[in-house]
């Protein structure tokens, strides 16, 4: 699937937003990928999940693990396509952990799936949670890598699309972005 086709899908579903956003990573950006808006459409959810599932189909995945909230829908569909159990991590006291009775058996093969990454922080935390349970993380599947491949998450990392979507630290926001009111559409509250 070509990058331009993916961008057109995001634009047609109003999932690619413009403005001034504070991302989950805490960085500021003029663009935001609201993957939930594109993944609400079964045809796109299936299409994107199939791309990731096809890439990892020979890896004998036991469990698909996603960081809450963004990766859950995509991860569940990837797990369905791979015939793997699907679970998610979520934050408790600021730390990404397994809850709700989810567990990982020692040596289970784990694929971590996320919708969008900028720095990869949530995915890295999910990987750590899986490894702490004795799981073997075999890869990280991503719908949109906003870092254009700069976020090194796993040696077997696959992104359906990589984009150079500039983001800025809070002390380095360009003047033209700083004058736009801030929006915080992500799943984690940023202070």
Image: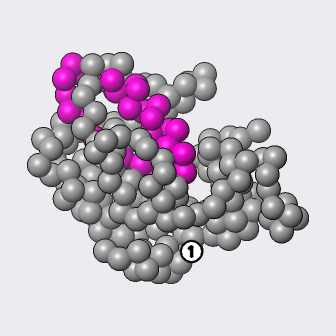
Find residue 153 and report its horizontal and vertical position in percent.
41, 41
Q: Is residue 120 inside the magenta stretch?
A: yes
- Looking at the picture, tell me which residue is in the foreground, 150 or 4: 150
Q: Is residue 102 above or below residue 114?
A: above
The quadrant of the rendering that contains the C terminus is top right
Residue 88 in percent (x, y) is at: 39, 36
Q: Which residues are magenta?
A: 103-131
Left/right of residue 33 with respect to residue 177 in the rendered view: left
Percent across and percent down for residue 77 are: 29, 54
Left or right relative to 75: residue 145: right
Residue 129 appearing in the image = yes
In the picture, which quadrant includes the N terminus? bottom left
Is 107 on the left or on the right of 32, as rendered? left
Rendering coords of residue 47 (x, y %): 29, 68
Looking at the image, residue 12 lies above or below residue 57: below
- Where 146 falls versus 27 (above or below)? below
Query: For the residue labelled by badge 1, is the local secondary structure a helix, a strand or a loop?
Result: loop
For the point 27% across and 57% down, the residue is 52
Q: Is residue 71 left or right of residue 61?
A: right
Residue 162: image quadrant is bottom left
Count of picture labels: 1
Instruction: Please indicate, yes or no, whether residue 39 appears anywhere in the rendered image.
Output: no
Identify the residue at horizontal 25%, vertical 47% (top origin): 79
Q: Which residue is mark 1?
A: 14
Which quadrant of the structure image shows residue 42?
A: bottom left
Magenta segment includes 81: no
Residue at 35% across / 40% down in the picture? 154
């Amino acid at each position: 699937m070509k990058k331009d086709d993916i961008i057109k899908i995001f634009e047609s579903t109003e999932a690619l937003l413009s403005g001034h956003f504070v991302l989950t990573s805490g960085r500021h950006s003029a663009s935001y990928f609201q993957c939930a808006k594109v993944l609400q459409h079964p045809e796109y959810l299936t299409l994107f999940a199939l791309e990731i599932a096809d890439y990892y189909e020979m890896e004998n995945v036991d469990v698909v693990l996603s960081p809450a909230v963004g990766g859950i829908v995509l991860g569940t569909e990837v797990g369905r396509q791979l015939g793997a159990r699907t679970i998610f991590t979520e934050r408790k006291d600021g730390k990404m952990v397994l809850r709700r009775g989810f567990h990982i058996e020692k040596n289970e093969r784990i694929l971590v799936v996320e919708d969008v990454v900028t720095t990869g922080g949530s995915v890295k935390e999910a990987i750590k949670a899986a490894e702490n349970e004795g799981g073997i993380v075999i890869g990280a599947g991503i719908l949109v890598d906003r870092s254009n491949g700069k976020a090194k998450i796993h040696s077997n990392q696959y992104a359906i699309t990589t984009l150079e979507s500039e983001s800025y630290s809070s002390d380095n926001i360009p003047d033209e972005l700083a004058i736009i009111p801030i929006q915080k559409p992500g799943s984690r509250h940023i202070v």
